[in-house]
Image (cartoon, helix red, strand yellow):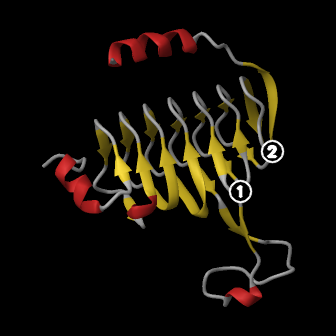
Amino acid sequence: MNSFYSNEELQEIGFKSFGKNVLISRKTSIYNPQNIVIGNNVRIDDFCVLSGKITIGNHVHIAAYVSLFAGNAGIEVNNYAGLSSRCAVYAASDDYSGEALTNPTIPDEFRNVINEKVVIGKHVVVGTGSTILPGVEIGEGTSVGSMSLINKSLDPWGIYVGIPCKRIKDRSKKMLEFEKQLEYEDI
């Protein structure tokens, strides 16, 4: 048996939509698939969690153990992006300030849940073990080093590292040439 769902099985899952050449591990946990849009040439590896309103573009790789907690605010992963293993992306999170109680077992009137959309731009790559918090937009072409905390939006075409992450230098745009070649071949 193949470790990825077949096209027929993907249809049965009930995604809002999905494109061609989509490979999703049978070991992925998928919640509310009717809120999930997946483009063409997408691969999602073992032990990932997809939960909430999620839009994934074309040529995207989501490595093993990545969790996308989108809630109603949503997570958008744009074309040519990649999330390395064990990344966690949160569009919803409890308020940890002590001004409210935390966790889903608590009635809503005693909680303060932060819900803000997360956007991962085109050509973004996020290193293993990184965490992205609600409201963050990672600009096009940005690279984030392993084990980074992304708690604020990042400007395009930079290389960022650390906790919290900081820009250390510019990133090359040479990949845009390869993108044009690939898109020409896809026609």
In-image side of 9 versus 161 (left or right): left
Who's the residue at 62% across and 35% down the image?
121
In the structure shown, which secondary structural element does the residue marked by tag 2 occupy?
A: loop
In the structure shown, which secondary structural element does the residue marked by tag 1 occupy?
A: loop
- Residue 118 image offset from top left, x and y in percent: 66, 50
Residue wearing tag 2: 164
Is residue 14 in view?
A: yes
Residue 96: which quarter of the image?
Answer: bottom right
In-image side of 8 versus 68 (left or right): left
Who's the residue at 67% across and 13% down the image?
172
Disc on the earlier residue, 2 or 1: 1
Q: Nearer the viewer, residue 48 or 156?
A: 156
Residue 59 against residue 70 in the figure, above or below: above
Crowdedness near tag 2: few (<14), some (14–19) or many (≥20) residues, C-alpha within 10 Å = few
Residue wearing tag 1: 134
Who's the residue at 41% across and 15% down the image?
182
Which amino acid type is marked by label 1?
Pro
Who's the residue at 80% across and 45% down the image?
164
Which amino acid type is marked by label 2?
Pro
Residue 151 against residue 102 in the figure, above or below: above
Mark number displayed over residue 79: none
- Residue 39 image offset from top left, x and y in percent: 40, 40
Q: Nearer the viewer, residue 96 or 35?
A: 35
- Residue 68 image offset from top left, x and y in percent: 53, 55
- Residue 150 image offset from top left, x and y in percent: 73, 45
